Image (cartoon, helix red, strand yellow):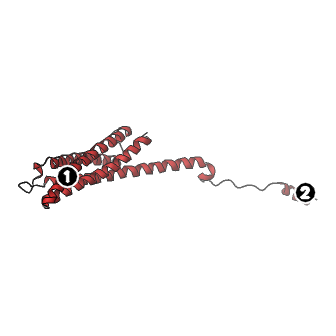
Amino acid sequence: MTDVNAHKVTDVLPEPTPPPAAGNGETQAPEISTGVSEIVRRWKREDLVKRGCLILHGLALVFSLIAFIVMASNTHGDWKDFDKYEEYRYVLAIAILSSLYTGFQVLRQIQELSTGKESFSRQKLALIGFVGDQVVAYFLLSAASSAVPLTNRMRENNDNIFTDSSVAAISMEFLAFFALAVSALISGHKLSNKSYI
């Protein structure tokens, strides 16, 4: 008789459920793992933007230096001397200014990426980058545009090494302008999103 009653008692008891697996973030707290992944994604995006700005400033530095070197060495005697033309002196001056500004930005960004410390507050850096990129980009565009008509007139009469060098320097300034214009767009995006907070 006892065997029959024991069988009935085991039928009434429910099966024990296994405990949840330890360390499984999805079953324990999905909102925490989603928040962490969002933060990691934001850090990766910010790092990509910083590296992108460094590349753009590096390209602008290279193009500005080439424009500076080509225009400064564009002296071939007589009327083939860049110093005799106001437009070419302006191209040279802006190439120097652009080289100094982009060189400073590249050095600052390399220092920040290598040490992880920012030289100024994020808000000031975003504002300096936005205003500086725009001002220097507009100067580059202005200088290159002012020299194009003179170079075209000279090339109608004489197509020689002087005019070819002038075209090369002007082209490099246009390329530096495009790099800084894209960098200014990124800086403006950072300012508008207030991602420096």
Amino acid of disc 1: Pro
Would residue 104 be visible to someone looking at this image? no
Could you say where residue 92 lies in the image, as x and y percent from the top left? 17, 49
Residue 33: give its label: none
Judge whether 119 appears above or below 151 on screen.
Answer: above
- Compared to residue 138, the image places residue 9 above or below, namely below
User: Please, is residue 146 above or below residue 162 in the view?
Assistant: above
Circle nearer the N terminus (2, 1): 2
**Disc 2 to disc 1: CB gap under 8 Å:** no
Q: Is residue 18 left or right of residue 46?
A: right
Q: Is residue 15 left or right of residue 25?
A: right
Q: Secondary structure at mark 1?
A: helix
Number of residues whose C-alpha sits closer than 10 Å to that of mark 2, classed few (under 14), some (14–19) or many (20 or more): few
Q: Is residue 151 above or below residue 132?
A: below
Q: Pointer 2: what residue?
A: 5
Quick one: quadrant of the N terminus?
A: bottom right
- Asked whether 165 or 98 is in front, the reply is 165
**Amino acid found under the numbered disc labelled 2:** Asn
- Quarter containing the C terminus: top left
Q: Residue at x 19, y 51 (%)?
A: 147
Horizontally, residue 139 falls left or right of residue 48, namely: left
Distance from disc 2 to disc 1, alpha carbons, whole Å, reads 109 Å
Determine the residue located farthest toward the right in the rendered image. 1
Percent position of residue 163, x then y: 15, 58
Q: From the viewer's perspective, is 87 left or right of 76?
A: right
Tell me the residue that label 1 is attached to: 149
